[in-house]
Image (cartoon, rainbow, N blue to C red):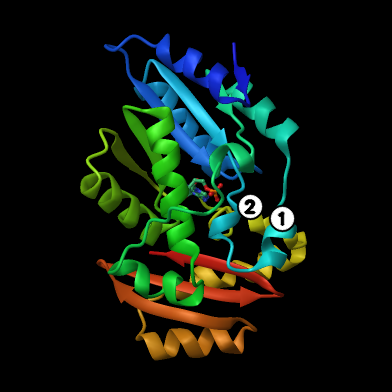
Amino acid sequence: MTQIIRDLTTWQTFRNKIPQASSLGFVPTMGNLHAGHASLLRQSVQENTQTVLSIFVNPTQFNDQNDLAHYPRTEEQDVAMARDLKVDAVLIPSVDLMYPQGYRYQVQENNISQYLEGEMRPGHFSGMLTVVLKLLQLVRATHAYFGEKDYQQLLLVQGLVQDFFIDTKIMACPIVRMPEGLPLSSRNSRLSAEDLKQASVFSKILQQHLPIPEIKQQLTEQGFTVEYVEEKFNRRLGAVKFKNVRLIDNV
Ligand code: AMP
């Protein structure tokens, strides 16, 4: 049975009942679940005695208030997916519960959060790291599952648990893509089926064995506004805007 938990007391009761010897998998999300999230949940269910999904649209990681206001919220469908996948608990905290003192304490990283996504989205990584630290402390999971789609995020979370001595193993999960090649993303729901097809050209171009300036030129010619295309961490990472929707990918 999947338990829906919205308050701290119920959560602590649930958590304290889990025996020390059994493993707890944790999948933090902002909801509007798709097959990418499902793959993380499946892996967690397979690898742990129990699995907890969290759904929390974290306001502090949105550098664009319009993006926050329009972020898709589909709680009923998300809970149905959790039930189908035999997730044990869905934690759906309120903003007040997660930020009892407002945004008073913040996690600031001073290396890889400073470029690429960090440069394009000021404050984003501090907001993300702050909420991930809070969630990891609250959940006390054995394993927490993160997608390689948000590659810088994954590296930053790995660094966070190391630096703050958090006893949770961070598990990296491969990118789940549409048949056309674009990574699945909650923000994709803002594009029509036709636009999504066109948007998929982004991933095809990014994967080509061509020098970066040519990749950027092709993207621009195909109607994308390029934010960055760079090679780092043994990968090629890119971010573009298409019809006002931000797309990221890495190969
Ligand atoms: P979000 O709800 O967008 O914050 O994502 C929650 C988690 O799911 C993060 O660890 C993401 O990296 C991961 N995720 C989102 N989309 C995908 C995808 N297409 N493939 C794999 N993981 C994903």
User: What is the three-letter code of the residue carrying label 2?
Assistant: Ser
Q: Circle 2 is placed at which residue position?
A: 186
Q: Report the residue at 33% width, 56% height from top.
A: 156
Q: Where is residue 105 in the image (x, y as percent from the top left)?
A: 43, 53
In the image, 217 versus 188, the foreground residue is 188
Q: Report the residue at 60% width, 34% height from top.
A: 93
User: What is the three-letter code of the residue carrying label 1?
Assistant: Ser
Q: Quadrant of the N terminus?
A: top right
Q: Quadrant of the C terminus?
A: bottom left
Above or below 228: residue 16: above
Above or below 110: residue 193: above
Above or below 222: residue 245: above
Residue 82: quadrant of the picture = top right
Q: Position of residue 222 (x, y in %)?
A: 62, 83
From mark 2 to mark 1, how far is it between C-alphas?
A: 6 Å
Assign a secondary structure to mark 1. Answer: helix
Q: For the residue with label 2, is its CB less than 8 Å from the closest atom of ligand 1? A: yes
Which label was assigned to residue 75? Answer: none
In the image, 147 versus 111, the foreground residue is 111
Residue 43: quadrant of the picture = top left
Q: Report the residue at 71% width, 55% height from top.
A: 189
Is residue 87 something that shows in the picture? no
Above or below 220: residue 177: above
Q: Circle 1 is placed at which residue position?
A: 189
Q: Report the residue at 38% width, 34% height from top.
A: 137
Is residue 201 something that shows in the picture? yes
- Relative to 95, 116 lies left or right: left
Assign a secondary structure to mark 2. Answer: helix
Q: Position of residue 99 (x, y in %)?
A: 55, 44
Q: Do labels 2 and 1 touch, CB within 8 Å?
A: yes
In the image, 131 versus 180, the foreground residue is 131
Q: Where is residue 92 in the image (x, y as percent from the top left)?
A: 61, 32
